[in-house]
Image: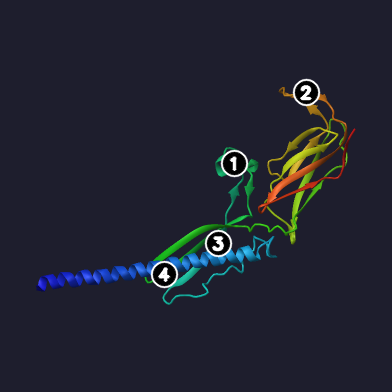
Amino acid sequence: MLSAFVVMSRLMITGIRYERLVDNEQNAIFLAESQMEEIRGWSAKNHDPVGTVPFSNWSSCPSLPANPLSGYTVAVNSTVQQIYSPCTTWELQYTNPARRRILRQSARRVRVTVSWSDRTYQLESLVCAPVAPPAASVAVTVSGAGGVARDNVATYTAVANGPNGVLPDVLFAWYVYGVGNGTLIPERDGAQAQLGNYMQDADTPANTVGYGTGPCLMRALARVRGKEVWGDSSQINLP
């Protein structure tokens, strides 16, 4: 009976220790998840284009939980996370890094570390720039030449402006509208495109087969923070 009592006592003590360990880990998970959601909510409320703070500014990121638990410490670390568009696998096929479409200011890698006793728990996630609400004003401006002589090329640049200035990491798709027509040469960065006043065949090297005379416009189309926006250049004359 004494041996059985000793065994039962040890099992009871082990059970109590394990229960305490599980409770501590659950508290740490709760603190980490709560802090991560606090950070997401802060970003969605304060960062452009919803708020007035540029997404690159994380100086006021909440680093302490609103209701800390005794015996636990919480640390928050965030770093810039580059992401590729449309996807990493596709963009890494370009051996020249300058040819890759990289979003450098649209995501942060956030790590929340909860420590207690001699143990730690870490929760890591990406936090992206907030989605623009329907009422948010996002305007696209397209600048470039108003005329292109035959056999010449002109460069056009597009910029997306939010309520507080230029929005970073906007990749545009380009189109030509109007009576006139030429050869559209978009850059992979999405911010620029060229319009050549000539039309070419599919040979290598290509041969000029004609000219599309008349007025036209260059249109830049993009999805900015979940909102589809576009802008047109001034009238372009192709003689």
Looking at marks 4 and 2 on the same chain, the residue that comes earlier in the sequence is marked by 4
Q: Callout 3: helix, strand or loop?
A: strand
User: How far is disc 4 from disc 1 in space, using C-alphas?
Assistant: 41 Å
Category of crowding for the residue at label 2, using alpha-carbon neighbours closer than 10 angstroms: few (below 14), some (14–19), many (at least 20): few
x and y percent of residue 175 in the render?
A: 76, 39
Q: Residue 91: which disc?
A: 1
x and y percent of residue 61 in the render?
A: 59, 67
Q: Disc 3 marks which amino acid?
A: Ser
User: How far is disc 4 from disc 3 in space, using C-alphas?
Assistant: 22 Å
Q: Which residue is mark 3?
A: 78
Displayed quadrant of residue 238: top right
Q: For this view, does 64 lie left or right of residue 162?
A: left
x and y percent of residue 104 in the render?
A: 63, 52
Q: Callout 2: helix, strand or loop?
A: loop
Looking at marks 2 and 3 on the same chain, the residue that comes earlier in the sequence is marked by 3
User: How far is disc 4 from disc 2 in space, using C-alphas?
Assistant: 70 Å
Displayed quadrant of residue 121: bottom left
Q: Which residue is mark 4?
A: 27
Q: For this view, does 220 lie left or right of residue 79?
A: right
Category of crowding for the residue at label 3, using alpha-carbon neighbours closer than 10 angstroms: few (below 14), some (14–19), many (at least 20): some
What residue lies at 58% left-to-right and 39% top-to-bottom?
Answer: 90
Cβ atoms under marks 4 and 3 closer than 8 Å: no
